[in-house]
Image: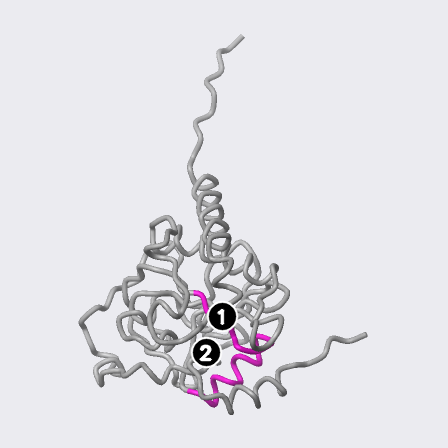
Amino acid sequence: MPEENFDAEDMKAALKRETADGPGFDTADVLPESDFESFAEEGVEKDEGCTGFEGDAVADGRQVTAVIAYDKPVKNLIDQLSATGHVTHIAYTKKSVTLHHNAGRFSHEGVLNLWKTRPASAHFDVDSAGAVAQYVKVNEYAWAVGNQTGNQETISIEMADATLAPAWTVADATWKSAARLAGWLFFKVIGERPSKSNFFYHHHWSSTECAGPYMDTIYDNVLKAAQDAYDSFKSADTPTSSPRTTPA
């Protein structure tokens, strides 16, 4: 039996909701004019040679922006999101990761379609099965947290909900995948272990209930999962010295 498609139903509800929750609502964020200018210099950081940043690739004769070099599949929706204009193409030093919930049961494409209507974006989305999609380059300014400094300094990860209001639950497969991705980003991009001082929910930055009441109840579990992932990636990346052998 095919899965029910919730995108259209939840999009109608999202467009009617007057709330900062969910993808595609960043009205508290007042962007300075300079943030829209490609020649703005303050806060700009080149990503050349930095592990974890995306490069460009050629597909079907056209140049496309590449996703992160994650060890799991990442759906590439970067250029499609860029076409909406709802992202600032200026690079910043990232210092934290922020989790959000969709406030809906969206697929990756459903999130993109909502962002075509609403002026907002995030770097990643994790769907109900735990699959990852990327919409914004990790060092760029996504319109996500309703706070200019937050948007400059954080990497935002959206998560699909399993149930709607008031619980807004998020499936284990979804939040665990988001936590693992966060651990990778902390290791490869930020260079620090996740902690309560750099691993946030959306409501850390602005007045909203996002990432939802359910996620609030399990924050410690989510943080630990991100820390475990960070430790695993760091351990795997640390070269081990081979034991010295003596010729017979």
Point out residue 65 in the picture as x, y percentages from the top left corner.
44, 71
Amino acid type of the residue tagged 1 in the rendering: Gly
Q: Measured along the vertical axis of the image, is residue 27 above or below residue 205? A: below
- Asked whether the beta carbons under mark 1 and mark 2 sit within 8 Å of each other, the answer is yes
Q: Residue at x 54, y 67 (%)?
A: 126
Question: For mark 2, does the 10 Å Cα neighbourhood hold few (<14), some (14 to 19), or many (20 or more) residues?
Answer: many
Q: Measured along the vertical axis of the image, is residue 44 above or below residue 224? A: below
Point out residue 148 in the picture as x, y percentages from the top left corner.
27, 75
For the C terminus, give its image quadrant.
top right
Q: Residue at x 48, y 80 (%)?
A: 80
Point out residue 164 in the picture as x, y percentages from the top left corner.
59, 77
Q: Specify the farthest residue to the left.
A: 42
C-alpha span from label 1 to label 2: 8 Å
- The residue tagged 1 is 212
Amino acid type of the residue tagged 2 in the rendering: Asp
Q: Earlier in the sequence, mark 1 or mark 2?
A: 2
Q: Which residues are magenta?
A: 99-118
Task: Please give the label number shown on residue 199.
Answer: none
- The residue tagged 2 is 21
Mark 1: secondary structure: loop
